[in-house]
Image (tube, helix red, strand yellow):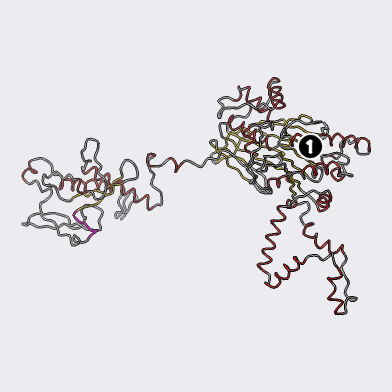
Amino acid sequence: MTDPSGYSPSFKRPADILRLRRSRARSVGGLFFPSRGSDSSENPGQSRASPGELRPFSPGELRPFSPGPRLLGRNSPARKRRNPFASLENAESPKKKQLVRKDDGESFFLVKNSDRTGENGSGDSSSEDREGFPSRSDSSGSEPDRTPDCQERLLHQDFLKVEEEAAGRPLLKSPQAIAPASIAPPTCREYPADWSLKTRLLFTSPLSLSWTEQPKAQEEAVGLSNSCRAHFSVLPQSLQDPQSSSETRCAFQQNLVYWQHPSLPWLSLFPRINAERSFSGKGAPWAHDAALQQSLMREWSASLSSLYSLLKSRRCPYFYVCSYQFTVLFRAAGLAGSDSITAVVSPTTLGLREAMKAEGIEFSLPLVNVRKKRSDLQDELHEEPNEACWKKLEAEGGGGGDDEDDSFQWLKEMGVQDKIKKPDGITIKLQKDAHSLSVDHRPESVVCVEGSHTFTLINFLINCKSVVASTGSQAGLPPTLLAPSAFRGATLHTLKSRSVNVKNQVKSGFQNLSSLEITGPVLPSSLHAIIGLLRSAQKGNFSASLYTHAPTAVMNVNAFEHKDTPVDLSGIGLPPTSVEQLKQPPSLGPSGLTHISMNDYSYSWRS
């Protein structure tokens, strides 16, 4: 027969369980803590129940007394059943141990609830009942309450605690018990330097970015003037209202400035690699005019020489040469962990590298050397020991082309020299260059030049005809020069910015965000300055998606020896914070940053 409420007769409701526990606690309290009435004065050690009715104690029971059958003794005095486990070390049947949490959230103390009253009949446990734990008395020195209601609450808390641990839910600690170092995330105040060129930046922030658009005429003029004079203002860490801060808007206009040569209003001269579609259909009056092409190259050569002079005197930190088939990055001494001028060329071909060798330019192929070492190591691990020794002897014995007759001397001794065709020099050279040809137009073909050879590279670029396309939509057009500082023949340009409000989908619905899009050739120093300005204006909360010009991503390779020689970079024309970042050796490898996020003034990034 079932209960009308839907419960089985053998199943008790939680309310019934708690009610039974409270009634049991009251009965136990009546036994241990008798009232001070007339009955208690006559028999202070007896409860209101029958004197001969006691419950036996069970060692495995969590309650003070077992709910087993009562032992009835009509004419016998009230006495307890002897505990057979009293002699064991960890079984103390007359007393129950409880772990009670202190206020600090971490330490505990052990309380023994005696089943018998003290000599005074009050039932209060003394400090000797706490084993190995500090006393938990209050400031007045009085012991905590030992009333039945308090015992019932402690038992109920222990029961809930066991349930939480069984369910796998961790117990929460109080804020005082958690050390600040354990909850504070690691902070990163700077992100690594990225020497690649960016074509597009997309910033998103929960705060408004409308202060970046529609500058006043005076604010734009101040920003351009400060950029030409290399004057940089120091902004506070957090700006309360960037919309009303004229200094912030001027700094943003200043960070958008870059210098370019040549400048043709109807043509976008960046990027140049694989950009034939953007040049097709546009007017090119120099394409079939040799005199005009020579005039363009003459002005371009003067601008390139001016840039290198500024770089050598540390008045310009770096500049880029963007041709239709490769890009060159020149860096001043003291940047990227080197105390001399460095240059990185990517991508290259075997013909370009051979032409550079013919001009006496010494360079290195860092990624090719690394891959070659790895392949040689794998070959040695898989080959027979004798074969590896023979290859090493052949490499050391070297020549092959110096004394060709000696290499075929053993064939003459056997008399079969006429039956074997001797390989010609072209075939031997192609076999040797097969590995070099496999890296053409790939990131592994990056070339690094250092020291005085960079000046030879400048002369090579001025006199080399392969830097200018002879056919196609870019025919006769000199490479594009990009720099953060003014130079001869340069034109001042600004990056294009646009701010809109968007909605981002989250779990609970949509979140209102403000976005800022910046397009154009974003230089490394411009990227760092813009991010530093948004750090103050957006109160350290924003994220940025970076779109890298693929041929320049490999320019983050660290191929030069790091030297700690101090170099004066005070007049290089960049903010001190950007100089400190660009002075560090590259650490991103052959890749560029794709995402930067700032949360609570701490950076995180992906490459």
Closer-to-camera residue (336/551): 336
Identify which residue is drawn at 88% across, 74% down: 420
Q: Position of residue 245 (x, y in %)?
A: 61, 22
Q: Position of residue 353 (x, y in %)?
A: 80, 51
Is 218 part of what is drawn in magenta?
A: no
Q: Is residue 551 visible?
A: no
Closer-to-camera residue (161/551): 551
Q: Position of residue 607 (x, y in %)?
A: 64, 46
Q: Is residue 61 above or below residue 600?
A: below
Numbered disc 1: secondary structure: strand
The amino acid beneath tag 1 is Leu
Magenta stretch secondary structure, dominant = loop
Return the residue found at the far bottom. Answer: 414
Identify which residue is drawn at 83% across, 34% down: 302
Q: Is residue 596 visible?
A: yes
- Quadrant the N terminus occupies: bottom left
Q: Is residue 133 above or below residue 430?
A: above
**378 displayed left or right of 29:** right
For residue 257, what is the image quadrant? top right
Return the residue found at the far top. Answer: 218
Q: Is residue 11 above or below residue 149?
A: below
**155 displayed left or right of 233:** left
Q: Position of residue 89 (x, y in %)?
A: 23, 60
Closer-to-camera residue (515/475): 475
- Range of residues picked out in magenta: 89-94
**472 displayed left or right of 16:** right
Which residue is labeled 1 in the image? 481
For residue 585, what is the image quadrant? top right
> For mark 1, does the 10 Å Cα neighbourhood hold few (<14), some (14 to 19), or many (20 or more) residues?
many
